Image (tube, grey):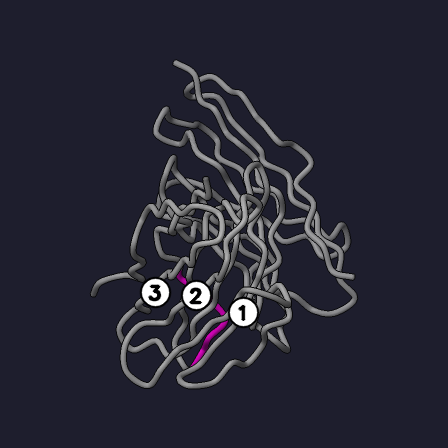
Amino acid sequence: AQSVTQLDSQVPVFEEAPVELRCNYSSSVSVYLFWYVQYPNQGLQLLLKYLSGSTLVESINGFEAEFNKSQTSFHLRKPSVHISDTAEYFCAVTFTYNTDKLIFGTGTRLQVFP
Amino acid sequence: NAGVMQNPRHLVRRRGQEARLRCSPMKGHSHVYWYRQLPEEGLKFMVYLQKENIIDESGMPKERFSAEFPKEGPSILRIQQVVRGDSAAYFCASSPPVSSDTQYFGPGTRLTVL
């Protein structure tokens, strides 16, 4: 069965430090990959996605993620975090042949301290 | 262009009552998806609908839950005879009829069952 694993439930980090949020997936078929961010008491916002092409994708607010097919990973990175990045981050996959449903990881709570 | 809209944002029901959650997709989107987020968990797919059709309801509980997306008006997720275990955040997402590889989420409805 397809699944998404986010190994870290919580990641505390100081402001301006780099951060990596890990995401691994298990699938026997091709997938599309997504990172969503959920700020407190809000809905999910699409942060970035990989559909095809370059394996490195970037968001407008400095996050990037790299699709690694051999390691079945899609880790999210930012070289320098801000207090405002404090949120829950969800990794998700969907199948390229059927995009009806997203399969989500359990989320990683990023807490940025001053 | 307004995003996905959900109402109410918060809903309190007593055990045995009915809960109706509404979702208006983004303009031009004809695909609607419902997800449930239990406390401290990721989102779980419930149902995928197009106008007047249920396409995939593999994530819906067999009893008490139903969904519709009529020709006119919002999509409705209906929970009959609610129980405490139904307390969760319910998110709606939508995607366009073409290139539906990305889902855009609403702010969610937080259901509390007393």
Circle 3 residue:
B23
Confirm or deny contact between disc 1 and disc 2 (CB under 8 A). yes
- Rounded to the nearest angstrom, the CA distance separating label 2 from label 3 is 8 Å
- Select label 2 or label 3 by which is in front: 2
Say the numbered circle drawn on residue B47: 1
| Helix, strand or loop under label 2 | strand
Q: Image quarter for residue B69?
A: bottom left
Query: Which label's residue is closer to the chain start, 1 or 3?
Result: 3
Q: Mark 1: which amino acid?
A: Val
Please give the range of residues in magenta: B98-104
Q: Is residue B59 above or below residue A107?
A: below
Q: Position of residue A30 (x, y in %)?
A: 69, 69
Say the numbered circle drawn on residue B77: 2
Residue drawn at point x = 42 percent, y = 86 percent? B52
Confirm or deny contact between disc 1 and disc 3 (CB under 8 A). no
Describe residue A77's horizontal placement relative to residue A31 as left or right. left
Query: Which label's residue is closer to the chain start, 1 or 2?
Result: 1
Query: Which label's residue is closer to the chain start, 2 or 3?
Result: 3
| Helix, strand or loop under label 3 | strand
